[in-house]
């Protein structure tokens, strides 16, 4: 069976600014699926992508209105990191690129997390989980 891929579709206001923002976080874009209406942001090559779609194009796929992510939250996007330092670094880069921190960092022992809001208000949680420190199942 082929491995499943995930494409998270997100409405954005400004393609140029969104690509620049996520580029500063180290993400790349697949030029084959990127134009002025949408950009295929590579999260993990071969499996995980975010489709950044300008709002009028995004609207063409749905019948409901687009939620204003600066006022309401429909989804939390969580990305894994390879270390606690990478979590802190990604949040720091997001804020420097014009995003906002989302809450404060949380250390749960086996998991460390923090987050940021992108330019359109979407919440991206970033976390590092230490499998060796994960509590045993009961």
Image (cartoon, helix red, strand yellow):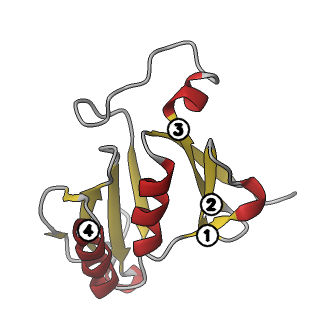
Disc 4 crowd, CA 10 A, few/some/many (<14, 14-19, 20+): many
**Residue 4 visible, this orientation:** no
Q: Earlier in the sequence, mark 1 or mark 3?
A: 1
Q: Secondary structure at mark 2?
A: strand
Q: CA distance from mark 4 to mark 2?
A: 20 Å
Name the quadrant of the N terminus: bottom right
Rounded to the nearest angstrom, the CA distance separating label 2 from label 1 is 5 Å
The residue that mark 1 highlights is 44
Residue 29, horizontal then vertical, whole percent: 62, 65
Q: CB atoms at circles 2 and 1 under 8 Å apart?
A: yes
Q: Identify the mark nearer the N-term, 4 or 2.
A: 2
The residue wearing badge 4 is 113
Q: Residue at x 19, y 55 (%)?
A: 102
Which of pointers 3 and 2 lies earlier in the amino acid sequence? 2
Q: What's the mark number on residue 71?
A: none
Disc 4 and disc 3: Cα gap in Å? 29 Å
Q: Nearer the viewer, mark 3 or mark 2?
A: 3
Residue at horizontal 28 percent and vertical 87 percent from the top: 85
Rendered image: mark on residue 54: 3
Relative to residue 84, is residue 98 depicted above or below?
A: above
* Few, some or many residues within 10 Å of mark 1 (<14, 14–19, 20+): few
Count of marks placed on residues: 4
Q: Position of residue 62 (x, y in %)?
A: 59, 20
Identify the residue at the far right of this view. 1
Q: Which residue is mark 2?
A: 48
Determine the CA span between mark 3 and mark 2: 20 Å
Say above or below: 82 vs 54.
below
């Amino acid at each position: 069976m082929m491995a499943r891929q995930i494409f998270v579709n997100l409405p954005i206001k400004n393609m140029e600014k969104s690509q620049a923002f996520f580029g500063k976080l180290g993400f790349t874009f697949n030029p084959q699926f990127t134009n002025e209406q949408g950009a295929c942001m590579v999260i993990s090559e071969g499996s995980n992508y975010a489709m950044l779609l300008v709002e009028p194009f995004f609207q063409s796929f749905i019948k409901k209105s687009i939620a204003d992510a600066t006022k309401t939250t429909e989804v939390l996007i969580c990305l894994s990191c390879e270390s606690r330092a990478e979590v802190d670094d990604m949040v720091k880069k997001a804020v420097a690129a014009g995003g906002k921190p989302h809450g404060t960092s949380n250390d749960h022992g086996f998991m460390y997390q923090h987050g940021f809001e992108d330019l359109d208000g979407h919440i991206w949680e970033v976390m590092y989980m230490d499998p060796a420190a994960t509590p045993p199942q009961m």
